[in-house]
Each structure stands twice: as structure tokens, then as C-alpha cells.
Amino acid sequence: MKLSLHLAWRFLRDGRAQSLLILAGVAIGVAAFVFVASIISSLQRDLIARTLGAQAQVTVTPREASSRALLEAPGALVARRVEPPVPRRRSFDGWPRYARALERTPGVSAVCPRVSGPALAGRGASEEAVVVVGADPARLRRIIDLAPRLVGGRYAAGGDRALVGDGLAEALGLRVGAPFRVSTDRGAVTLRVVGIFDTGAAALDDAWVVTSLRTAQTITGRAGDVTELDARVEDLYAAESIARSFAARTGLEATSWMQRSRDLLIALRAQDQSSYMIQLFVMLAVAMGIASVLVVSVVQRRGQIGILRAIGTSRRTVLAVFLWQGVILGAVGAVLGIALGVAFAIGLGQVTPFPIEPEPSGLAIAASVSLATGLVAALLPARRAATMDPAAAIRGDA
Amino acid sequence: MSAPLLEAVGLTKSFGEGEARVDVLHDVTLRIERSELIALVGASGSGKSTLLNLLGLLDRPSAGTLRLDGRDTEQLDEEARTELRSERLGFVFQAHHLVPALTVVENVMMPAAVRAGGFDEAARARALALLASVGLEGQGDRWPRQLSGGMAQRVAVARALMNAPPLVLADEPTGNLDTQSSDQVFALLLREQAERSTALVVVTHDPTLASRCARVVRLVDGRIVADGPPDQVLLDTRARRV
């Protein structure tokens, strides 16, 4: 290995101009790889934060009651019309046990039991339809983090304290510290605005009143009960399979963001695919560049390869000499390309509406792909060099 | 009678198949003793280089056997033949084929580096001593492109001797050189052969150079037609031009 690496390095140094040119090609290819990956991943991060940041990735609810025919007569012909069930309040029996089971499910990183219900919020003569959302503030933060989205006040809930969206605050003329009325068919309570958030999602900003679990249970008349269990998952794209398996295991209904936001999912997958295609073609071009340079090098050095074989250099060593050249080009190209790609991405991030932050895992993938590309691209020329007939190579016939 | 260093029996070599088949060597039988100095002469296309390639294990015969140090080389796989070349043979070719990416001393060290798996200080000292013995003292750190043709061929001679092989095969080692360099390189080969008791087989077109060898083997159309002392073989050869 020592000898083959030494020879590989010297061959690359000897053909300096050629080596520098292909190195520039590899570096530009890797930079494009890193740049595209950084932009797409940052764009997706931003898109996901904007859209999914305001909803749970997996939501578990009690199963809807299903209608069934009154008469079931095997073998008999029955004319029937089955009406959908009348909506009614369902209690989530045994939710603490299901919450614990969901927490223990592999791939689930956080669970938040939540109670939600419709209500009217009013101040003076103004009234707005709202959704009262009650959850443990610390648990809710791990699902939907409203704290960094506060435009006023502080993140706290409980007692009569509530967080409201900026749309609702504007509609009712609410400011931090202002009291407002929340009423349902069970009566009315007065809450006080402790913080105002702006998530960018109108459904939340115009309608949510976030308070503690206990307060919301009181308002919605669900003492000790919850309406749903919200969960966050480690791998966003595993949400659907986690939801399916949990539903199958428990008999509850579990939906993932992938069901609720199909358009977003399609958009993300399309972005991923175009990113992969661009990266694939870039690395193919890099591979062909490395391969063509090494093929030329093998032809140019056939006399030297012949004499190396004649003096006892094994085929394996000759093979290794050219494979090392591919690896060196891939490795040095990866270092230069990653630096260039990161610089480009950060530079572009200064003028985009979302920050571009190259992911360390993306950089590691770029480095691995570059190394593998160098190695694979060198295989053909290396094999050609290793299988050269030494006598023919010395004559210049190989 | 001790075993010869190298013994070829009934060597035949053909290229191509069917109607395109060309027989280059026919039934060549040759013994090479230790420390022997042999000139291989013959017209262009007579099969000298093909024979040298077979003797150097760079190619395999179509028929016949070749024993080196008593080992039947045809029974060996490619890796074993490569190893045998590294241990027992030295090569000098018409073109020096120095590796331009390596310095002069590294080129000389190459056969030892192949055996050791890398360059080491002991080999470097031996290579520098060899360079001094071929008249290239102080040239070790130069690059092959900085050398004249004669100097480069002397480096190739030093390289061939690096592993102290018992047999050196030289294929027209002076073919690309001017008369003066040619004389110097050939004299160097003969001196090193004598000093190191190495057997040397040298292919040459030059009857004057061939006459300085103890034994001359003459090939015509792939067959050995004469094998003996130079005054016997070359008398006829001179008349025909080698």
C-alpha cells in the first residue's frame, strides 16, 4: 500500500496540469452537490417549519363510531340505507395509558395530550369563533413551539392566562394583559392575554386560544379528558408508518402530517427528487472526468507500467496505484468542493428570505460520494493498467 | 554437471490463430549458465526480442518448457512469475523507460521497493552506490528528464542490478544511443557483469558489441542457427550483416 500510494501521488504530481484541471472539475462538482443539497434542505426546513411547525406530525384520537345496518341477515337480500352517525362528543378513555404507549413507540420523540374545543371569544361587543387549545405548556413546546413566535408578552399558560394569535388579538383589540371572555354552551370564563404569537398560519393566528390543559378542560367541559394525543417524530417521513402501526396496535385513529398535507408531501418529494437528479448528473460528470484523465494517464504511461510489471510489480500494486489516484482526486476534490460549496451557500443565504445552513450530514454524504466516485471512476483505467501485458506495454502496443 | 541458471527446451511462440497465425519462434533450446555473457544476434524480425521476453517471463511460450534455477516456470501462476522476475531477473530495454515521476535514485530503488513494499533508507544507500558505480555519483536527486539518453540508460542499468539478480536481460540497450554513449553503456554492462558474476544476455544488432561477448547465439526466422564463440558465429554473421 505504501508503494502504491507513493507512486499514485508521484504520478499525479508528475501530470500536474492535468491533475489540477481534473481536481478543479471534481471540486466544482462537489461544490455544486453541496450547494444544491444545502439550498434544497434549507428550503425544505423553512417550508416544514412554516407549515408543519404549527401542527403535530402524528395525531391520535379515539376511533369514530361507525354506522351499521339494523338488520343483518346472511343469505337474505336486504334493501337498506346506512346513515352516517350523528356527531357527538367522544371521550378519550384511557388516554394516559395510550400517551405512555405512544411515548415508548420507537421513532416518537415527544407526546403532548391536548384538549381542543370550539368557543366564542369576545371583548365588548366583538366576538370571534375560536378554538380553545389546552395542553401542558412544556409538552406543547415540543410539538408546536410558540415561544420563539411570540410578538408580545411571554410564554406561559395556566389559571386565567392564555396565549392568543396576533390575528385574534387584532380582531378583538387585545394587548398583553388584556382580559377577554371565552364562552361555550356551558358558560363563560374570563381569561387574560399573557402572550401574543404570530406563526404565519392564519388558522392558528386568527383562532387559537392556548391555555393550560386544566383550564381548557374546564372551558370545554371535558374534566380529566383530552381530545387527542399529539406527537413529534424523529424522522419526518416515518410519521405515516408510525401512525399506521400505532393505530393497528391500539385500535385508535392515528393520522400523520403526510395524510393531512399531501400537497406539501408531494412538493417535498419533488424537491428531493430534483435535488437527487442534479446531484447524480453532477457526480456522473465528475466520474467521467476522473475516468477520462486516468485512461489518458494509463495510455501515456504504458511503457512505465510495462517496466514496473517487468521488474516485479504485481498486478494488484498497479491496480492500487490507479485506484489511489482516483481516491486522492476524490478526497482533495471533496475538501476543496465542500469549502467552495459551503461558501457559496452561506453567501447566497445572505440574500434569500430563509437562512441557508449546510447540514453536517449533507457534507459527510458529499465527501463520501466524492471519494466513492473517485474510486469507481478509477476502476476501469486501473483494471486496464493492471491487466496490461508487460511485453506489449514496453513495446508500446498495449 | 550443475543445473543451468536457465534452461529453455523446445520453445515455440506463435501469435494469432488460424490463417492469421504467425510462428515467431520454432523449437528453441538454450542453456544459460551462471555468470555467462551471451549476445543474441539476428536480423530484425528473427525473434530475438520474443525470445528475450520468454526468457524474462514477460510472455508465455506456445510450447516448450523454461526452467529458471530448476523451477518450471510454466507451472507458476502470474503472481509467482512476477515474484520470480523481481527476485531473479534484471531488465534493460532499448528505451530506458525510467519513471519520470520518480527521481533518479528512486528509479534505481524501484526493484527493491517492489520487494519491500516501499522505499527504505538501506535501499537508498545501495542505489546511490550503484549510481556511483555507473558513473552517476551525485545525480540521485535529479529527475529523468534532466538526463541525457546515455545517462538515462546507465540509470536503467543500475536499476536492473539493484536486486543483484543472477540474470540480466538487455534488449538492444544501446539501440537509441549515439556511438560514444553506446560504447560507454555497453562497457558498463560488461564491467558490471564481470564484477558481479551476473549472467547477461544482450540482444544487439552491432557485431562489434556482440564480439565482446563470450558466446553468441544467432537467430534466423525464429530458429537458432548458430551458438558458439563470437569468432565462429560472427564470421558468418558479418558476411550477412547481423
Image: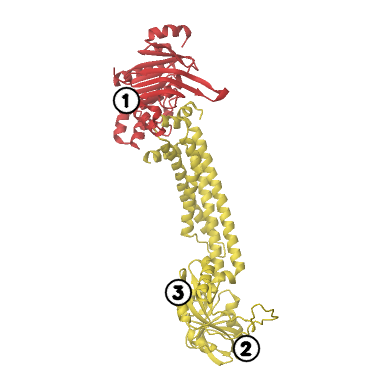
The kind of residue on which mark 2 rests is: Ser
**Residue ID for mark 3:** A103
Task: Give the mark toward the camera: 3 or 1.
Answer: 3
* Residue B151 seen in render: no
Q: Are marks 1 and 2 in contact (CB under 8 Å)?
A: no
* Residue B109 seen in render: yes
Residue A167 in which image quadrant: bottom right
Query: Whole-Å distance between the Cαs marked 3 and 1?
Result: 79 Å
Q: What sort of colour scheme is used for the picture?
A: by chain
**Residue ID for mark 1:** B132
| Residue occupying image coordinates x 52% and y 52% | A31
The kind of residue on which mark 3 rests is: Glu
Q: Is residue A99 left or right of residue A122?
A: left
Q: Nearer the viewer, residue B123 or B74?
A: B74
| Residue occupying image coordinates x 37% and y 10% | B229
Residue pushed farthest bottom? A187
Residue A178 location in percent, x, y?
Answer: 53, 87
> Tell me, what hue is chain A?
yellow
Q: The chain drawn red is chain what?
A: B
Numbered disc 3: secondary structure = helix
Q: Is residue A107 above or below residue B239?
A: below
**Dot 3, how many residues are within 10 Å of its Cα: few (below 14), some (14-19), or many (20+)?**
some
